[in-house]
Image: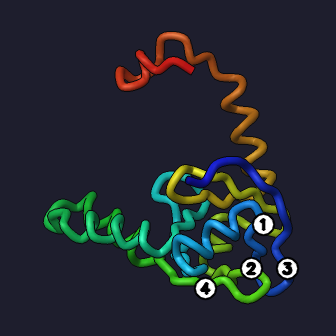
Amino acid sequence: MFRGVATFNLDVKGRMAIPAKFRKHLDVCCEGRLVVTIDHSDRCLQIYPLPEWEAVEQKLSELPSLNPQVRRLKRMLLGYATECEMDSNGRILLPAKLREFAGLKKSTVMIGQGNKFELWDEETWNALMDECLEEDFDGILPTELENLSL
């Protein structure tokens, strides 16, 4: 289970060092083998341990390709999916096309999302969080969240 937020810098080659608090678990659950792809609705990247990605990939491949929205989603998620392996220093190289899509410059934010991570440009992430904090959530929660007690 991945939770929490970590900020760090990409190096000049586009490599990111997986934060130490996540690295050990990734060594155990997937031997440092990850899949990075674009997010279908936000300008960020999704990073999955390989076994988690394989489950997502299986579900996507079972969807009916005659549906234009399904084809579009498959093109985005499967088409940009890139396998990455942590090196001995716990770094992965993010492909330039994926860094470009997410607008990643130097300063980045990695957010644990349970079975995966989101990777954001820090400035974009901070702006999104500011927007979220300004929203009034009263009365607009989906029915799935109405009984959630935090």
Count of numbered labels shown in the rendering: 4
Compute the Cα span from label 1 to label 4: 15 Å
Mark 3 or 4 closer to N-term? 3
Q: Please, what is the three-letter code of the amino acid marked with disc 2?
A: Gly
Compute the Cα span from label 2 to label 1: 8 Å
Residue named by callout 2: 90
Mark 1 or 4 closer to N-term? 1
Q: Which element carries disc 1, helix, strand or loop?
A: helix
Q: Please, what is the three-letter code of the amino acid marked with disc 4?
A: Glu
Q: Which element carries disc 2, helix, strand or loop?
A: loop
Residue named by callout 1: 20
Please report contact status of discs 3 and 2: CB closer than 8 Å, yes or no: no
Q: Where is residue 121 in the image (x, y as percent from the top left)?
A: 74, 59
Q: Where is residue 105 in the image (x, y as percent from the top left)?
A: 80, 68
Residue named by callout 3: 11
Which of the image's four quarters has the C terminus?
Answer: top right
